[in-house]
Amino acid sequence: MARLHNYYAGPAALPLEALEAAREELLDFQGSGVSVMETSHRSKEYDEVHNETISLVKELMGLGDNYKVLLLQGGASLQFAMVPMNLLGPDASADYLLTGSWSQKAIKEAKIIGTARIAANTEQDGVFTSIPKQGQLDLDPKAAYCHITSNNTIFGTQWRSFPDTGAVPLVGDMSSDILSRKFDPTPFGIIYAGAQKNLGPAGLAVVIVRKDILEKCNKGLPTLLSYNTHADKNSLFNTPPSFTIYMVNKVLNWVKGRGGIEAMEKENTQKAELIYGTIDGSNGFYKNTIALEDRSQMNVVFRLTTEELEKKFVADGLAAGFLGIKGHRSVGGIRVSIYNANTLDSVKDVVAFMKEFMAKNG
Amino acid sequence: MARLHNYYAGPAALPLEALEAAREELLDFQGSGVSVMETSHRSKEYDEVHNETISLVKELMGLGDNYKVLLLQGGASLQFAMVPMNLLGPDASADYLLTGSWSQKAIKEAKIIGTARIAANTEQDGVFTSIPKQGQLDLDPKAAYCHITSNNTIFGTQWRSFPDTGAVPLVGDMSSDILSRKFDPTPFGIIYAGAQKNLGPAGLAVVIVRKDILEKCNKGLPTLLSYNTHADKNSLFNTPPSFTIYMVNKVLNWVKGRGGIEAMEKENTQKAELIYGTIDGSNGFYKNTIALEDRSQMNVVFRLTTEELEKKFVADGLAAGFLGIKGHRSVGGIRVSIYNANTLDSVKDVVAFMKEFMAKNG
């Protein structure tokens, strides 16, 4: 069948060019005579992929040499535990800013391992429709770190600018908006992201750790759970998920070829404005209740007037070629996930479909 | 270029049929309109891949319903830590049978976490050329478990039959020989294997846990590091490495289509006999010093009379189309890794090359 418009929240759409390039050399990687899946992680061919991937993350994100880029297994979910395992000692405490389901999971893990304070919480009646303002933060100036979830895939909110935590290093779960916009990494001690939204297939977390943070990490951890193990061995202490890293490499090269993060951000803003504009201009047919300044540019969530109409929207959408637009099972409604690989043309088609659906059912 | 004979120790050769099938549907997975890399891990399409993969492991290995098959990230190296984290309490001790580099790493992790006894050690002058006999085991009848490395990729030894540990459950790292031979799983409480030899690409560990062991696992662990998390959620607690699992699915179906483990074992025995026969019939031109009954059927290691000749063997071998035959950097020499996907015909070509090389250089 023809390829659909893929609006899954993750694993999500990949650039067609990346998939085509992988298909082209799937049986013979760059003339090596074997697939990249079959080559040793100690081979010259794989080594180039591995190191270029790390360099591209640094280059695209504008990271200085005081940051190490680690390529780890276990997804962001394992980072929920690795961050406190590495950074929380018996006398330390960390601040967490609670803005949705993923922050909740991160807090749960931190509390298993050490002391975690909730320094802000935007929950109201079980949902999270805003990002806290600077004045709403109850920050501990002695915290080991302050953890945020930069974008909330389920509730559709996003930290459009980051909180000021003074000397306390920020730790950011950027799984769903890494590489989508330019930002100053300086306040961040750690940035981590599961690959399966803006970076590549599932099965990898990109973990960026500032060197002064590495020096403070706890000793005596299980080897694989220590950031220093992977920093010291360039993420080759054990066999890395080499094919997944290879796909991330293809995606990063695609981002670079398209003009880098600035170009991504510009298009992401256009895409988001198109959909939010359609919602806001629908006279209440489509509703988004997120505070305007906190709306996510990655996951646009909205409701229709009845659940029945939402079901019809999802079904008609699929019939029209739009996959994965059903809201997360915990909140219902509609969610259109517009990551880097979702093209502006495709989003224009979404908007056309939304208008047509409204005309027919309004 | 033409595909080479791939003798890497891991990541290693995959069945050509599995790679071709993946290539065929890389942009459109079973008519879903998206790549399997891009589909949600909650989609119907992925769900079928996931569940069939688990069923095939059980079917091919003859595992009863008292075993759970988990699909985890972090490779076997993370299992070195997860086994003791889950099974060692403050008053417990585990036995480890030390037969090579990988057992050493497993022991190192266990000692970080709890008490690990070395119940056998076949090291002599820094190398491991044999597997302990039953009478050489100093077993603790109260051990929480007894850990073995079923095949030693670096030294080329293999437990051809498993030790009797009475009521103490065996824990087996079978990363390099899973699915290569039939065995009775009954004494095993846990079997784990990194995927990148006999199962698929790197980035996955298949972990098989007996239900009575699950019931004994420690509580209060970080969520991702608890076997019960993954057993309770069918390895879908967090996003699984879906493309890697998909490739493992292809490999498992290939094994089944070729006649299952019995057929693999028969061919693996033939392949090993061909190479060992050539070594043993070479009048000392090729030398393998492993005790005959402990020789690995997966990794045939041997030496030539000088390091210079070994270098020439590797170089001439590569020129003749044989990739990855250099021994592990820690021991030198030659290693021919003959996993399930290395065909009998290809091994016949290796043997022909060995004979020709000997004729020219003997």
Image (cartoon, coloured by chain):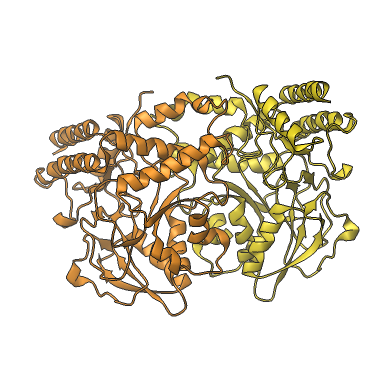
Chain colours: A orange, B yellow
Q: Nearer the viewer, residue A187 or A98?
A: A187
- A53 left or right, relative to B155: left
Query: Horizontal and vertical percent for residue A98?
Result: 30, 66
- B309 left or right, relative to B282: left
Determine whether A195 is above or below B35 in the image. Answer: below
Determine whether B121 is above or below B352 in the image. Answer: below
How many numbered marks, from 0 up? 0
Q: Residue furthest bottom?
A: A91
Q: Quadrant of residue A359?
A: top left
Q: Nearer the viewer, residue B26 or A141?
A: A141
Q: Nearer the viewer, residue A261 or B283?
A: B283
Quadrant holding the C terminus of chain A: top left
Answer yes or no: is residue B27 visible.
Answer: no
Answer yes or no: is residue B152 visible.
Answer: yes
Quadrant holding the N terminus of chain A: top left
Determine whether A244 is above or below B232 in the image. Answer: above
Q: Quadrant of residue B315?
A: top right
Query: Horizontal and vertical percent for residue A234?
Result: 49, 51
Residue under the image location 58 percent in, 32 percent down: B250
Query: Horizontal and vertical percent for residue B139?
Result: 83, 65
Q: Nearer the viewer, residue B361 or B181?
A: B361
Determine whether A62 is above or below B321 in the image. Answer: below
Query: Horizontal and vertical percent for residue A269?
Result: 18, 43
